[in-house]
Amino acid sequence: MDAISTTRNSRIDFLRGTAIFMVLAHHFSLTYPLVESPLTRIFPPVWVERLVENGNYGVTMFFVISGFLITSNNLLRYGELRGVNLRQFYAFRFSRIIPPRVLALAVIVVLGLCGIPSFTNGDGGHTLPASFFVIAVLSVLTFWHNVLMQAVGYFNYCLNIYWSLSVEEMFYLTFPLACLLLKRMTLIVALCAAAIVVGPLYRAMHRDDELFFMYGYAACFDAIAFGCLTALCFRQMNIGRLARVVIRCVAGLGLTAAYFAGIDGHEVFGFSAIAFCTAGLLVNAADSAGPKTRASPRRMADWLGRHSYELYLFHIIVLAVMRDFVPKGTLSYAFKLPYFALYLLLSVLVAAAVSRCYAEPINTGLRRRLASS
């Protein structure tokens, strides 16, 4: 959710915007089911149900994009993966990732300590003391929050979703080290291929527990590996325009089919299919042209993609406040779509404010300091 290209890429931003919208719709519908809203008068109920139920596939798309971007940007910056400058890489990741995350965690902890229901450690049918915030925040900041959840279950409505950040940051931590140690491109490709094989095997072993088949490192690294391999294998290939169009069309159709087939019953290979098709949409994406004049819906999706990290961090805080204001099960049928629109609007406004007034200035300042040191 937080891998940022040094140059904006409209196609990648559009994919990220699509993915974050899936996640936002999924989380809203868990509290206020959109399948029981006027939306089903516009679209078939089964479409609405599949769209909102399978929003976790949006996270899989993010993993693929992160793997693609980190690999592409490192190749662009250093020429080859084994030439990565660890100090610069980790410093740049820190300046982008940690400041907004610390802000989100501070808001959650303060509101949780104040006893606001959706911010306390009382989710998932059991209650943990306020002191558990210490280990919970530590797990988010040191990239093992998914492991903590596997040990204790769902425990905090807002913090629960940050499991995916631990998966991405563990990738950021280990992938450059692996590139330096392995050195040869064939070995790096073999490592990615191994992750792609291990992913379904791990999910097959844990298909009855979503805390494992959906949140485990091994369950997610295959999606990141698909992104890495796409960046590695297609960077020097001269693919014709017609071939690129065919690949994207097939990938888009496959992605749609896999998404609407759903997670339930496809725990083992469903995530692999989503990752593979997302990777197909990224073929030659690094060579795509910059921003162009587009229709409003496309520009909006691009904006969501550019601010997907802040949206992911803070939309759950917005939703937590809204669900405490209007508790689950009390929102009427007629007001679900207006409330959904309000939730999207507030999430966008908060994300924009955090990005413009806090995250971007800190990121820019830290990077300038690093560049001059």
Image (tube, grey):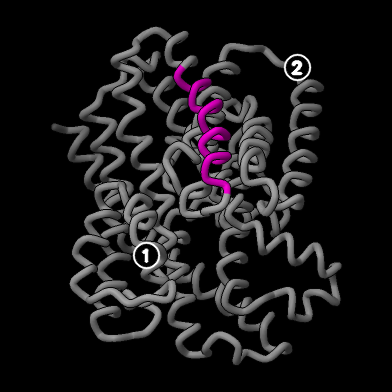
User: Going 67% across and 12% down the picture, which residue do you hit?
Assistant: 238
The vertical placement of 366 against 122, above or below, is above
Viewer-nearest of labels 1 and 2? 1
**Disc 1: CA contacts within 10 A as few (<14), some (14-19) or many (>=20):** many
Q: Quadrant of residue 188?
A: top left
Q: Which residues are magenta?
A: 191-207
Q: Is residue 205 visible?
A: yes
**Is 269 one of the magenta-colored residues?**
no
Q: Nearer the viewer, residue 316 or 311?
A: 316
Residue type at tag 2: Gly
Residue under label 2, please give it.
240
| Residue 20 at x, y percent in the picture | 56, 56
Q: Secondary structure at mark 1?
A: helix
Horizontally, is 157 left or right of 204 in the view?
A: left
The vertical placement of 45 against 312, above or below, is below
Residue under label 1, please give it.
159
User: Going 84% across and 68% down the picture, which residue do you hit?
Assistant: 43
